[in-house]
């Protein structure tokens, strides 16, 4: 009798662990915005995988009275045209001289907690130096609690061209 009871308890424990593990896996995959995928014999490295999502290019003027989060959103979106990340969300804001100068004016006129970060980013971009784009993207991404879509490197010129063609 004790052996049957022990076997039953162990069986229910194993089933409970499997149920909790399955639930956790499904929730994690749903948070990524993906359906759980079956195992595949051919798995690509993360550097090769591309998002199929098409984003919309936005070219509207910035609001002079934007808050700090909105400023961060715009810088983050602008960085998307320079960085490789498996997933990207939001709109496509191109890094143009007009966008850079408008954001610089907004930062200089406003009272932002991270003003020096924004100005150093925009000054580098104004000079055509985008070597900080991965750091800018990932810094803002982490400030906003990012879990998926971390930038891993700068895009190649060919990848930038493809990104702009896909999203225009």
Image (cartoon, rainbow, N blue to C red):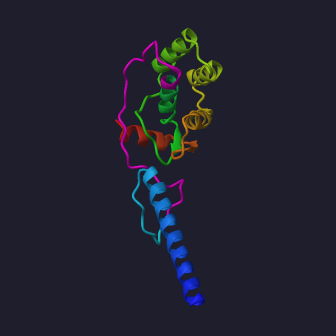
Residue 120 visible in the snapshot: yes
Q: Residue furthest front?
A: 1
Residue drawn 57% across the image and 79% down it? 10
Magenta highlight: main SS: loop
Task: Indicate yes or no whether the magenta region holds residue 63.
Answer: yes
Q: Number of labelled discs? A: 0
- Residue 99 image position (x, y, % from top left): 46, 20
Look at the image and tell me in which quarter the C terminus lies. top left
As drawn, is 52 to the left or to the right of 104? left
Task: Please say if 84 is above or below 62.
Answer: below
Task: Please say if 102 is above or below 69.
Answer: above
What residue range appears in magenta?
43-70
Residue drawn 39% across the image and 58% down it? 35
Residue drawn 43% across the image and 29% down it? 93
- Residue 163 image position (x, y, % from top left): 42, 41
Residue drawn 47% across the image and 72% down it? 41
């Amino acid at each position: 009798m004790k052996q049957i009871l022990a076997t039953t308890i162990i069986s229910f424990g194993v089933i409970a662990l499997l149920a909790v593990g399955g639930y956790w896996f499904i929730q994690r995959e749903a948070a990524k915005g993906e359906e759980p995928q079956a195992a595949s014999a051919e798995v690509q490295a993360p550097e090769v995988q591309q998002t199929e999502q098409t984003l919309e290019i936005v070219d509207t003027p910035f609001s002079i009275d934007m808050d700090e989060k909105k400023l961060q959103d715009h810088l983050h979106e602008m960085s998307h045209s320079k960085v490789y990340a498996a997933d990207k969300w939001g709109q496509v804001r191109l890094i143009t001289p007009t966008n850079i100068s408008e954001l610089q004016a907004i930062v200089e006129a406003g009272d932002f907690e991270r003003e020096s970060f924004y100005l150093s980013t925009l000054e580098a971009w104004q000079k055509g130096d985008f070597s900080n784009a991965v750091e800018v993207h990932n810094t803002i991404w982490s400030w906003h609690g990012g879990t998926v879509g971390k930038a891993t490197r700068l895009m190649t010129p060919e990848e930038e061209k493809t990104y702009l063609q896909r999203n225009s």
